[in-house]
Amino acid sequence: MYTEKRKKLLRECFRELNKGNSELLMSIFESDVKWEIIGDTKFSGVFNGLEEVTEKLLSPLHANLDGGIKIYVDNLFGEHDYITCQGRGEANTKNKKSYNNKYCWVYEWRQLKVIKVTEYLDTELVTRCFS
């Protein structure tokens, strides 16, 4: 019932993010969202709640980027309360390194709000760019 709405919403969120507007993307997360980034990088771990996600993950990441990041959706797959997004990002770090990563996000939803994100990415690239 919600699968196509969720896919459309994610595409809209990333289109807005690429214009410099993160408000729509941030609005889809429940306040108690759980976000896990795999691996052993400075950004890996489990972040509980939107406040912690913002303070300990998104703000520090953005502070290391020169001009933000653009995210492009390559594929969206949905079943039950899950949408999986294969995507790629384009960014540069403030120390002039190219940070063009590939991602797989697994979003768990409750109606039209995300309650959990599991993020898979090239951890070696994260280490090279942000160490």
Image (cartoon, helix red, strand yellow):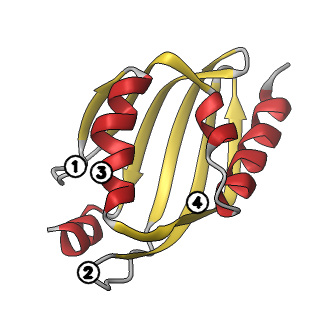
What residue is shown with label 1? 39
Residue 7: where, in percent of width, then height? Answer: 77, 40
What residue is shown with label 2? 95
Name above or below for residue 116 compared with residue 16: above
Q: Characterize the local packing of mark 2: few (<14), some (14-19) or many (20 or more) Cα atoms within 10 angstroms.
A: few
Q: Nearer the viewer, residue 101 or 16?
A: 16
Q: Are marks 2 and 3 in contact (CB under 8 Å)?
A: no
Q: Amino acid at mark 3?
A: Pro
Q: Residue at x 32, y 85 (%)?
A: 96
Q: Characterize the local packing of mark 3: few (<14), some (14-19) or many (20 or more) Cα atoms within 10 angstroms.
A: few
Q: Residue at x 51, y 44 (%)?
A: 105
Q: In whole angstroms, how far apart are the C-alphas of marks 2 and 3?
A: 14 Å
Q: Is residue 72 left or right of residue 49?
A: right
Q: Amino acid at mark 1?
A: Gly
Front position among marks 3 and 1: 3
Q: Secondary structure at mark 4?
A: strand
Q: In whole angstroms, how far apart are the C-alphas of marks 4 and 3?
A: 21 Å
What residue is shown with label 3? 60
Q: Characterize the local packing of mark 4: few (<14), some (14-19) or many (20 or more) Cα atoms within 10 angstroms.
A: some
User: Nearer the N terminus, badge 4 or badge 3?
Assistant: 3
